[in-house]
Image (spheres, grey):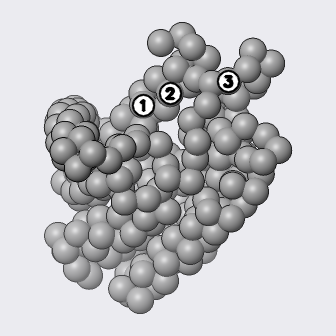
Amino acid sequence: MKFNTASSAKTISIFLFFTMEFYLVCWLLIPLASKYVHTYVAWYSLGGVLTMLPLFLTAVLLARAEKGSIWQRLRLRPLTRAEWKTSWQGLGLVVLLSGLMTLALKGFFNLLGAEFSMDPAFMTSTPFEPQQWYIPLLWLFFFSFNILGEELLWRGYLQSADEERLGYKAWILNSVLWCLFHAAFGYQMMLMLIPTLIIVPLYVYKTKNTWTGVFIHGVFNGSASIFLLLKGFGVV
């Protein structure tokens, strides 16, 4: 299917708009809300409603404005056996390289006598109270639109169109802009995320299927988030 090819200016503009909006949410609204509610409640609520849900809606509305099926435009077709194999390879690489990157960063910051944090720089990690049982529900809302919003807009809509004009350079552009989007997390976490920020666009380019990105991004991000939730409730 031929897409309405996005210009580089359009791709960069959409990324920059949401990057600036995300930065304001992370560094202005979430710290303000965290004075009254738990940081994770502020993060999942405000981040979900103000950034991740709009990403999802933007992808759907832009795809709907073009001719043809939304599913085709966003490259949402069932994964073939070969594409599943490629997707699992991508996930394995993300897990392996992210683990190595985290160990390297921890060692590097220890040598400097500095603290290394695996949390976004604008958040403080404190235990949850028993009455905050609803936090996993907020996470589920946030997580769903986080994965679908980013993958449908970044990969499904923008990268797919860029590939028709730029070829393999499209995933490189997508990776660089996705790194910029995550700058709001602070440099430590952004460095830790580099394997994900490179491998997801690359492997979506390999399969030409957005479900590859949803699978890799969702499984890795979801596993890490569930661990943090269990840690917050003192289970692990």
Residue type, numbered disc 2:
Leu
Secondary structure, mark 1, is helix
Residue for badge 1? 224
Write down the residue under mark 2. Answer: 228
Q: Is residue 8 left or right of residue 121?
A: left
Asked if the residue at tag 3 contacts the one at tag 1, i.e. Cβ–Cβ closer than 8 Å, the answer is no
Q: CA distance from mark 2 to mark 1?
A: 6 Å
The image quarter containing residue 135 is top right
Residue 226 spot, x, y in % from top left: 50, 25
Q: CA distance from mark 1 to mark 3?
A: 17 Å
Q: Residue at x 35, y 53 (%)?
A: 188
Tag 3–tag 2 contact (CB < 8 Å): no
Residue 206, relative to residue 126: is it above or below? below
- Closer-to-camera residue (166/175): 175
Q: Which label is found at residue 26?
A: none
Q: Is residue 201 left or right of residue 44?
A: left
Establish if 25 lies above or below 33: below
Q: Earlier in the sequence, mark 1 or mark 3?
A: 3
Please report the residue visible at 30 percent of the width from the left and 70 percent of the height from the top: 176
Nearer the camera: disc 1 or disc 3: 3
Task: Assess whether mark 1 and mark 2 are in contact (beta carbons under 8 angstroms).
Answer: yes
For the point 23% across and 50% down, which residue is it? 112
Check the picture and name the quadrant holding the N terminus: bottom left
In percent of width and height, residue 206 lies at: 19, 54
Where disc 2 sits, the SS reads: helix
Q: SS class of the residue under badge 3?
A: loop
